Image (tube, rainbow, N blue to C red):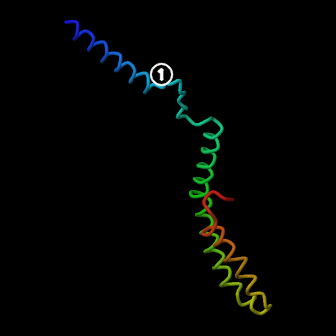
Amino acid sequence: MRFSRRCGLRSGAAALGVVLATAGVAGGAESEPDVAPAESRGALAAEIGAKAFDAVILRPIGVAATVGGFGCFLILGPMAAASLGIGTAWDILVVDPAEYTFVRPLGAF
């Protein structure tokens, strides 16, 4: 009977040591919180909001501006060719809106 009591105490002490070690109490180690600071959460929310605004609002407007600029270029192209400014008209009406829409990273204004 005495042997079984010692065995029970030892196993109980070992179990308590394992529980305390996993909780970080036995070794004196402090665990770091899994929650991000409020500042980084706010910055992350702002970044997500900027990307969503860009994807939902600005990119479709950029596509419309690219298509509309190409249409205007077709109409104004002969006049621009007569004044030797066809490259400038192409850049302003088509290339600039296309780069803003398709080349620029999402959320970078």
The residue lying furthest to the front in this view is: 3
The residue pinned by badge 1 equals 26
Q: Which is more toward the observer, 87 or 12?
A: 12
Q: Could you tell me residue 102's position as x and y percent?
A: 60, 69
Residue 16 appears left or right of 92 = left
Q: Could you tell me residue 24's position as x and y percent?
A: 48, 26
The residue lying furthest to the top in this view is: 1
Q: Amino acid at mark 1?
A: Ala
Query: What number of labels is visible?
Result: 1
Mark 1: secondary structure = loop
Q: Which is more toward the observer, 105 or 84?
A: 105
Residue at figure coordinates x 64%, y 66% from the top left: 104
- Which picture quadrant has residue 21? top left
Residue at figure coordinates x 43%, y 27% from the top left: 22
Residue at figure coordinates x 62%, y 49% from the top left: 47
Other-residue count near label 1 (Cα within 10 Å), few / some / many at <14 / 14–19 / ≥20: few
The residue lying furthest to the bottom in this view is: 82
Q: Could you tell me residue 11's position as x and y percent?
A: 30, 18
Residue 31 appears left or right of 76 = left
Q: Which is more toward the observer, 42 or 78?
A: 42
